[in-house]
Image (cartoon, helix red, strand yellow):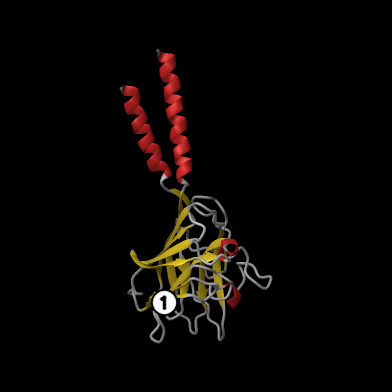
Amino acid sequence: MRKQLALLILGAGLATASAQLTIYNHQFNGSGGPLNGTPETVSGVAWQAGSVFLDNGVVQTLVAGSANGQAAWLPFTPQDGLIYTATATILNNQPNWIAFGFLPATPPGGLNWTDTSFQVRHSNNGAYLWALTRNNPTAADQQAFVGPNTSGGLADFNGDLADPSQPVEIKIVLDTTASTWTAEFFLNGTSRGTVNVPDAAKTAIGGIGFSRDRNATDNPGGAIQSFTLTVVPEPTTGALLLTGLALLAAGRSRRAL
C-alpha cells in the first residue's frame, strides 16, 4: 500500500512538473547597459537587439523623421503537437508603439536584428502573431495582427482597450496540436479572440521578441517589465514517463517479495 501511495504521489508530482516547461523567462535586472549580447536568464542564449533596448528593460526613444525601428530577438521555432504561451508586460505611455510577438529567423534585406531599420519592425519584417501598445491620440492604443506584417488585424484587439500609463500585458497562446494551428490573444488577462494561423507561419516563425516604431520627438521611452515563453509538452511524453515510473516500481516490488 505504501508503494502504491508513493507511486501516486510521484505520478502527481511528475504530471505537475511536466504540465509547463519554461523556455524563456528573462529578468530585466541589468544596470542599464545594452540588451544586445545579454544572456537570456533561463536559456543563456544571447539577445540580439538594437541599441535602444537596454538590459534593465528600458526601451529608449528612436528619433527619426521617417519610418524607422529597432528590435530585440531570441530564437524560437514552434513544433507540432504543443501549446506555447508567450507573455510580455510593457509600459509605454508614448505615441509610438512597442510591439511583442513572434518574429522570423532573420529580417529581410540582408539585415540583422541589431540594425536600425523600419524592416526589423514586426510591421515590416514578415512577422506573424504579434501585438502593440502605445498612447496615441489619433490611433488605436492597442492592436494585434495575425500577419504577415499588419495583415489580419483582430477586430476585438483594436482600440483604446487598456490604460497605457499602466503596464499592459500581452499574451499569445499558440496551439499546434491540430493540423490547423490556432492562436488566442489576451490583453491584461482578457481573451480578445482566437484565430487560425496561416500555414505559411509554420515555417516563417523563427524567433520571438520585441520591436519599436520610430519616435517623432524625444521622450522618456518605455519599458519591458517581463517576458516569458512556456510550453506544455505532448500528453504522450508525460504518459510514457508515468508508464516507466510504474514499471520501475513494479520491478522493485517483485524484488522485494
Q: Amino acid at mark 1?
A: Arg
Single out the residue that lies furthest toward the front. 179
- Whether residue 41 sits left or right of residue 165 in the image: it is right
Single out the residue that lies furthest toward the top. 257
| Residue 117 visible in the picture | no
Front one among 87 and 148: 148
> Within 10 Å of the Cα at label 1, are there few (<14), some (14-19), or many (20+) other Cα atoms?
many
Instruction: Tell me which corner region of the image, top left, top right, bottom left or bottom right, holds residue 36.
Output: bottom right
Q: Residue at x 49, y 50 (%)?
A: 42
Q: Quarter holding the C terminus?
A: top left
| Residue 245 visible in the picture | yes
Front one among 39 and 81: 81
Q: Residue at x 38, y 42 (%)?
A: 16
Q: Secondary structure at mark 1?
A: loop
Question: Is 76 drawn above or below residue 130 in the view shown?
Answer: above
For label 1, the residue is: 134
Single out the residue that lies furthest toward the right. 110
Q: Position of residue 189 (x, y in %)?
A: 33, 63
Q: Quarter holding the N terminus?
A: top left
Q: Position of residue 96 (x, y in %)?
A: 46, 79
Q: Position of residue 127 (x, y in %)?
A: 55, 69
Front one among 184 and 139: 184
- Whether residue 100 sits left or right of residue 76 in the image: it is left
